[in-house]
Amino acid sequence: MSTNRHGGRRYARPVGGNPSASRTRLRDVADLAGVSVKTVSNVVNGSAPVTAGTRAKVDAALTQLNYRPNLAARNLRRGRSGLVALAVPEIDSPYFAELARRIATAAERQGWTLLIDQTEGDGERERLVTEGFRSQLIDGLIFSPIASGRAELAHRRDRTPMVLLGERVFDGPTDHVSIDNVAAARTGVAHLLGLGRRRVAAIGRQRRPTAGTARLRLQGYVDALTAAGHDYDDALVADTDSWRRADGAAAMTELLRRRPPPDSVFCFNDLLALGAMRALHDADLRVPEDVAVVGFDDIEDGRFSTPSLTTIRPDKDRIATLAVEVLAERLADADVGRSGPARELSAPFDLVVRESTAGPVAGAVLSSG
């Protein structure tokens, strides 16, 4: 049994239950509970507040009658399919996989089925997503763009409600959910500086115009150095074509050739950090004694690496909930012909300190944003 965002409940008929349950009507539930049909509807759909006592009576009647709402009929009446799509660059990226799972859970609470598309950051694939090649199938879209910018999205012809994720487009034509990447990166680098590290390297800079996330995290890196009175040294910043483990290992190996080498490194995601730690191990250097490492994303792998990885933890639960709730609001607005300005929404983050910077101290949350 699950709860929707209004506090109402959705009921599934137990296996082996009354075979006639699917024919149970709201009127039957109302008669058994001694309330109106409208009250039962409010409980089932969460469309209006109901007192605790009344809700308890309706819940008991729903359970006794094994009532199961006909979501297909409800969607048909609303002109809806009950399907929404999530389009991300890489479905094998641990960050996007973990986020997709949370979005699927939040979508289920709305009674939706989630479809997932992989764009690989390709402009043509992203155009197909945003221009509605599935517009006859889906009610809404949650989209993390790489190639598509504000101009492309502003000229989008498809009117399917859309919520953006990521750092490619801010103040665009549609709702957007993100975290403050500059502040988050600044927090990670400040942690290394606060440990007394003086040659803090960065791995993950990307020079292509579409690399919005990399630019923001690089800005946070520079800001932290400036705030601590350190000069920026371009020799301590490593470029990578992508943000995978092999890129992190190659970049760390190159940084170790520079003299003097870094005593710490801030990686723009956890996969880069895991690759960097492998390169440090291969070079017979200890983490964190010789080189301290901070990542970004708090993927599950980092909690079980040796040493475990200190990282910036975006609130993925909050990102998923915000994206789905905002999309649900846009769909509700569309039902009544209402619209409003695009919104910029921010989810919080934490710095989780583990062994890669603090040795045996693990799991402490030092700061948040």
Image: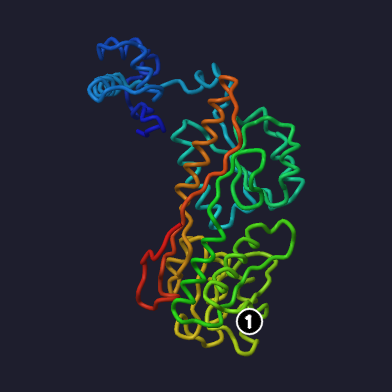
- 261 to the left or right of 4: right
Query: Residue pushed farthest bottom?
Result: 259
Q: Up-down: is 111 above or below 218?
A: above
Residue at (67% x, 27% y) in the render: 136
Residue at (57% x, 61% y) in the render: 182
Splitting the image into 4 quarters, where does residue 327 fall?
A: top right
Rendered location of residue 242, percent (x, y): 67, 64
Residue at (54% x, 58% y) in the render: 94
Splitting the image into 4 quarters, where does residue 114 fall?
A: top right
Callout 1: SS: helix
Residue under circle 1? 255
Looking at the picture, which amino acid does disc 1 mark? Leu
Of 318 and 8, the residue lying toward us: 318
Q: In this view of the protein, can residue 245 be seen by the observer?
A: yes
Rendered location of residue 12, percent (x, y): 37, 28
Query: Residue pushed farthest left?
Result: 53
Q: Up-down: is 188 above or below 138?
A: below
- 115 to the left or right of 197: right
